[in-house]
Amino acid sequence: MGAVSLLAMIHQPAAHADTPKFPDLSGYTPVNTQDYAIAFDNPGRQPTMTDYFLTPSGVVCVIDDGGAACFGNNLPSVPALEDPNSRVSYIDTQKGLYQSSNPGYVNGTTIRGQQIHTLPAAHSITVEGTVCGVSNSGTTACKDPQGRGFIVSPSWTGWLPKV
């Protein structure tokens, strides 16, 4: 084995034996998406509706634009950010885990004065082919129509490029 091959093996990420398996969401009770819709002002037109929910542990999640994301400075197992007032962590079906600007419109469990509802255990929400669900153990899992997903569990947060 050459030195380059050995070096590549050393720097290659270890297999994620502790990566949770994506749950089967098909048996979860679907919720009415209208109960999770938040209206955003759209001057001169009808408000834009976007579906948000809270995980049982209080993480804010959104289903929009063909995917899903959960965000905040409370994602389990994600290191705290140096400046949590201007930056937050996101886990997204399309991009994985990243940091971005703090969406100032979220204030705790409300968005512009509208309450974000918790998605209960053993329930799912589906919007335009993207589905998210919460297990009885508090794990939130989302996947988009392209089969990309993520899991936010009490002990692990991570992206799954293929579910």
Image: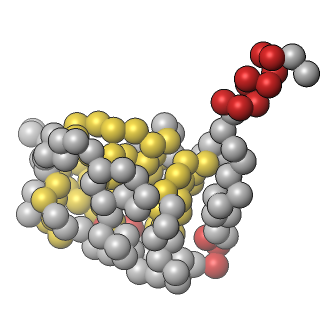
Above or below, 158 against 20 in this view is: above
- Label tally: 0
Residue in the image at 73% along x and 23% along y: 7
Image coordinates for residue 57, horizontal then vertical, percent: 34, 73
Asked whether 3 or 45 is in front, the reply is 3
118 relative to 134 in the view: left or right: left
Query: In which quadrant will I find the N terminus?
Result: top right
Above or below, 57 against 17 in this view is: below
Q: Can residue 65 be seen?
A: yes
Q: Can residue 70 be seen?
A: no
Q: Residue furthest front?
A: 3
Residue in the image at 43% along x and 48% along y: 91
62 relative to 131 in the view: left or right: left
65 relative to 102 in the view: left or right: right
Above or below, 56 against 152 in this view is: below
Above or below, 94 against 138 in this view is: above
Residue in the image at 69% along x and 44% along y: 14
Image coordinates for residue 63, horizontal then vertical, percent: 40, 53
Q: For residue 88, what is the image quadrant?
A: top left
Residue in the image at 65% along x and 61% along y: 18
Image coordinates for residue 61, horizontal then vertical, percent: 35, 58
Q: For residue 82, what is the image quadrant?
A: top left
Asked whether 127 or 94 is in front, the reply is 94
